[in-house]
Image: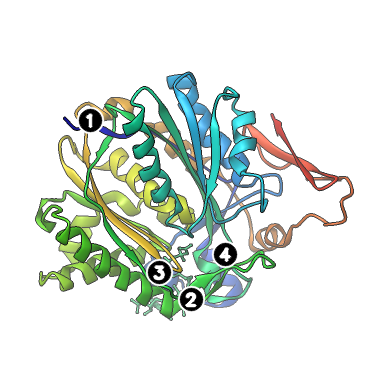
Amino acid sequence: MSISIGIHDLSFATSEFVLPHTALADYNGTEIGKYHVGIGQESMSVPAADEDIVTMAATAAAPILARHGKDRIRTVVFATESSIDQAKSAGIYVHSLIGLPSATRVVELKQACYGATAALQFAIGLVQRDPAQQVLVIASDVSKYELDSPGEATQGASAVAMLVSVDPALVRIEDPSGLFTADVMDFWRPNYLSTALVDGQESIGAYLQAVEGTWKDYSEQGGRALEEFAAFCYHQPFTKMAYKAHRHLLNYCGYDTDKDVIAGALGQTTAYNTVIGNSYTASVYLGLAALLDQADDLTGRPLAFLSYGSGSVAEFFAGTVVAGYQDHLRTEANLEAISRRKTVDYAGYRELHEWTFPTDGGDHATPEQTTGPFRLAGISGHKRIYQTR
Ligand code: HMG
């Protein structure tokens, strides 16, 4: 008999600051309709100098431990493409900040924005093998492009933490998955760069190819029919991409691509991403959080997930919403994480964008900016120093 495994809890965190797209548009002379309508973005999260993928991840994960304890967590899988070290997993800093026991395995995973879905699927495998254990999956990223580049308007930052277990309280993840990999150079970041390189139009085309490829495989593996899904959670580098992706899928399947039909299928999945921006690995799960928080009752309804990571790997899979899920949501905290951000002006954003530690191995403190529970206090002898506030 197969056991029910999936997302038992989900919590997210974002940054201290936010830049409205109106400020970016005022600076670079862009007609605001291009941002608000053309790419579907209102604002983007901007990390403080003393925030990074670790502080956001710990902030997202701490409430999960507060609710469920730590005794059953034996694995932490940290998905990111904004890695802070080539050897040590960012998850180890989080493990220490949130006080997980030493009898834990911790690992970092990377495949662009797709990494968190790999982490989720690997977590399901671990729980299948040992149903007593819970796995903490963390997706945390800072999306950063060159100043004054077309990608600049699609930046953002957030972390999503998910507890994966048997008898999940939120979403039961199903088999099969539809898989797709293609060796494309649509978006990448060589080790010596702090900002990503991207071929914008190529990346949109590669994403759409992946939608097609995953759906084809999903169908061949015996997945659900398109009409069965109550909503579609897409990876959202900018929210308009979810509309493009769903239109492409409907076209591919020979369906009507009416605007209202597409909007209905996406539902509330774009509500958080439109004000947070691209948060790479976390993006598709922010879509899920927004949907569960804001949609009418979804009990028993199947949801579709399309996770895309440039380079590229993608996966299409389904999950069913569990009865009673509303009692386990974190809607108030999620809205608070978004509304507590302080608006920065364009000059302030630019300063934060350019902030970087000297690489001389000396002692360097970070300005005290974040009001969140964890901060990156500085660097000393090339070692990052984190603090609980
Ligand atoms: P761009 O050249 O600045 O914009 O790049 P554009 O000229 O393509 O315009 C964008 C849209 O705005 C167009 O709509 C315009 O018509 C519209 P579309 O034709 O696409 O439907 N527009 C307007 N609409 C209303 N009023 C107006 C107006 N003016 C224009 N006044 C681009 C846009 C997204 C390419 C750029 O921002 C970029 O390069 N972003 C980064 C790459 C990206 O996000 N790619 C997405 C797919 S790849 C992916 O998802 C993976 C990723 O998350 C990374 C990972 O996996 O790790 C990125």
Residue placed at 40% from the left, 50% from the top?
118
Asked whether, in this view, residue 317 is left or right of residue 151, the answer is left
Eye-nearest disc, 1 or 3: 1
Kindly identify which numbered label has been placed on residue 185: 2
- Does the beta carbon of the residue at mark 3 sit less than 8 Å from ligand 1? yes
Quarter containing the N terminus = top left
Residue lying at the far front of the rendered structure: 129
User: Where is ligand 1, by quadrant?
Assistant: bottom left
For marks 1 and 4 on the same chain, the one whose residue lies earlier in the sequence? 1
Eye-nearest disc, 4 or 3: 3
For marks 1 and 3 on the same chain, the one whose residue lies earlier in the sequence? 1
Classify mark 1: helix, strand or loop. Answer: loop
Classify mark 2: helix, strand or loop. Answer: loop
Residue placed at 43% from the left, 39% from the top?
335
Per the model, the C-alpha gap separating discs 2 and 4 is 31 Å
Asked whether, in this view, residue 194 is left or right of residue 115, the answer is right
Eye-nearest disc, 1 or 4: 1
Eye-nearest disc, 1 or 2: 1
The residue pinned by badge 4 equals 23
